[in-house]
Image (spheres, grey):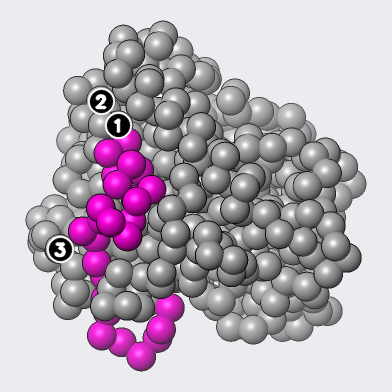
Amino acid sequence: MIKHTISPEIKQFMVNVTKKAGAEHVDWAKVFNVTYANTLETTVKKIAADDNFILTGDIPAMWQRDSTCQVRPYLVMAQKIPEVSDFIRGVIKRQFFNMNHDPYANAFNSEANNAGHHKDHTTMTPWIWERKFEIDSLCFPVQLAYLLYKNTGRIDQFDDSFVSGIKKLLDVFEVEQYHTTKSKYRFERDEDRPEDTLVNNGFGSPVSETGMIWSGFRPSDDACVYGYLIPANMFAVLILDYIQELFSSVLNNSTIVQQAKKIQTEVRAGIEKYGTTTNQAGEKIYAYETDGLGHFLIMDDGNVPNLLSAPYLHYTTMDDQKYLNTRKTILSSENPYYFSGKYGKGLGSPHTPKDYIWHIALAIQGLTQADKAEKARLLNNMVATTNGTNMMHEGFNVNDPSKYTREWFSWANMMYCELFLNYFDYQIKE
């Protein structure tokens, strides 16, 4: 495990924040102090002065998704502490190095060392840890670069590597809108776990063209069943909006603006036409996945992007009726991955055992509603289910929190911190 010392300025920020918790929430503050420092102290591998590789935690690789979520709550500090802004800039540089290397890969090595899943049947290189194509692995680095700009005003992250990465992202999105006829991506893994491989000789199950972007895998790294992952397409709509803004104002490239706008229009129309269904009460809701051929999954997963996070991703609002119908459905037994027990209730995942719910999902549940008392309830629940580690986990058993997955999971830690900061009105500018 890497061990770094955090600076006095960061320590002072943490002191100021935890003062707001007061005597009433000492336990919240204790967990915040451990989790907020943990990412900086244990997951950062400095490659160069402006190049930061971020370990996900107990796996020695960098996920494009996780690394964004691991540093996103530091944007609040970056507003006032240049050191933190520079650190995030270094993460973005590494993310776009990765994206330019292979926009289809989800996880990377810090050097060309051939670590990871090199027995998979796909196009691997020594830099790649895993090559599961997930839409959000392209979206999250763009989000981080944009949010650094919005929170600090800096624009040096929008360099040639950024522009090249955006071009590759747009090209991949366009190809995967026509996965059946244009895509050359294949993925198979020779293991017993079916969620780790794609059917149909690595091509995925059949889909029709809908305007949406095909995704091989979910943000859990589990294979999609029906190809069009609705929450990931929602995230793409947001990112395509960011790209249009950046290439109209900060950068000047009308071709990229037009390309992004065309894809965004098609994806949004596809979500609304093909990505909705009805729940058991006959109410219109968003499906989790569809194939455009009439099949739907009514469920949600604890990982982000998920349907629960739609307002967090700014695809819709917290009071939108279709979202409220969807939220009610997925936070109920109608979702096969919603679990309730003595120590909690919330979203789990096919990625973890039955009756295990995710700390990440509890944080998103708090961040997608306005009731402060409900935010407090969720923070209390998260703190009470660390099993004395003062760290968040992947999933924990709703009837026995001593049973959990991943003792060291930086993404989950930082989602707790984001909800904590949100509760005390420390806002990330978006």
The single residue placed furthest to the bottom in the displayed view is 192
Q: Amino acid at mark 3?
A: Thr
Magenta span has 178?
yes
- Local packing at callout 2 (Cα closer than 10 Å; few below 14, some 14-19, many 20+) is some
Q: Bounds of the magenta span? A: 169-195
Q: Which mark is residue 123?
A: 3
**Residue denoted by label 2:** 163
Callout 1: SS:
helix
Q: Which residue is mark 1?
A: 166
Q: Does the CB distance between marks 1 and 3 fall below 8 Å?
A: no
> In the drawing, does residue 138 fall left or right of residue 181?
right
| Residue type beneath disc 1 | Ile
Q: Identify the residue at image location x=42%, y=41%.
A: 139
Q: Quadrant of the N terminus?
A: bottom left
Residue type at mark 2 is Val
Above or below, 356 relative to 418: below
